Amino acid sequence: MANKVLFCATVDYHFKAFHLPILKWFKEKGWEVHIAASGEMDIPFVDEKFNIPIQRSPFNYRNLAAYEELKLIINENDYKIIHCHTPMGGVLTRLAAKQTRKNGTKVLYTAHGFHFCKGAPLMNWLLYYPIEKVLARYTDCLITINEEDYHRAITPRFMAKEVEHVHGVGVDTERFKPINEVDKLKRRVTFGYNENDFLLFYAAEFNKNKNQKLLIKSLAKIKETVPNAKLLLAGEGVLQNSCRKLAIELGVENMVDFLGYRTDIVDILPMCDIAVASSLREGLPVNIMEAMACGLPVVATRNRGHNELIVDQYNGWTIDPEKTYDMADKIILLANENHLLTNLGKNGRDRIEEIYSLKIIVNEKSHLYERFMEEMEGKRWMAQ
């Protein structure tokens, strides 16, 4: 009988977006792959999928039902490894796996950016910090994706058996890559832009944390200096309408394109000039890694995730999230210095290839899994 691994998260899209290479890796090792999450999406490389009603909010009563279902799933299957993701997926799974862990199952949790961090709201610290401290003792390996979280997790307050730092989920550098100037112009024509437009790109949900209003305010400060600038905002969310109103109030509505939800970002990014990001908090943002892989310099607000990816004056800049003038000044500089666009963009691409490419991340994760496989099976898995 094949060994079984269970992956858990709040929503099933999380696996399709970020973890297909690892699901495939387990299948190639001869393991049976199960997923438990909310949603009915078909996920490749999965043998069994459980649709359970996990909710993002810790106060939603449906999480009690999700916990009971998850506990039943775990108790009925002889999982060798359980790997959980997302805050509520991590909470419910580790609680549900307490008994099976005593029988030898290894429980891993990836924190895709602790909700408690420098600059996080006090409520986040009051709610999530004590929960993670308690649940760490039911965790065989706590995986962090940035240095700030890693150093916090290795303090004596956290009692996970092991703490590891993996550099995120990886970027497919064969899909996300620069294109030549001829192809860039053709693509711009296809999307309705001109050769001389200076395209700024940001993909994120419209919410308070993503802080798109900073970018719109910065655009208002450069509209005379860089009149050909266009800010492309991909995504949807509760604050989208208020951002539209702000653009009108500041007289930059013709310089902002609200693209909505997109599935073609891989086509849009390479035709742009720079990537911008305005979020207050990040773990290790995939949108920035994808932009860097496409050779775009980045101007982003200063937080733990952006600080991890962006080296000032090497592949972009990080700026104070409250200073629109800093964002505006860096955009103007890049618009006027073509050599900076080229050099910083190339450096960003090199940084992705050296540290954050999909190949490197799968290798990091596979070594981690292999350690637990060896512990549970000796060397038998190598002969499969």
Image (cartoon, helix red, strand yellow):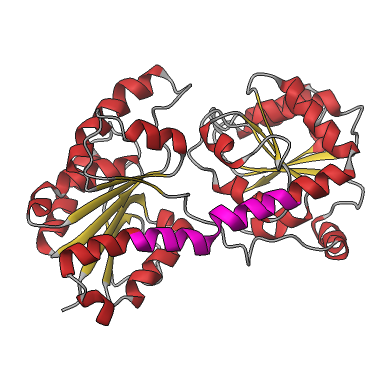
**Magenta stretch bounds:** 346-367
Quadrant of the image occupied by residue 24 = bottom left
Vertical side of 38 occupied by 57: above or below: above
Residue 381 % position (x, y): 24, 75
290 relative to 302, above or below: below
Left/right of residue 185 with respect to residue 328 in the rendered view: right
- Identify the residue shown where x is 31% and y is 29%: 128
Residue 50 or residue 6, whichever sits in front: 6
Task: Give the quarter of the figure containing the N terminus.
Answer: bottom left
- From this viewpoint, is residue 173 visible? yes
Q: Is residue 302 rendered to the left or right of residue 85? A: right
Q: Quadrant of residue 131?
A: top left
Residue 306 lies in quadrant: top right
Q: Residue furthest front?
A: 379
Count of numbered circles in the view: 0
Inspect the magenta stretch and tell me whether residue 204 lies in it: no
| Residue under the point 86% across and 63% down | 186
Q: Position of residue 264 (x, y in %)?
A: 65, 59
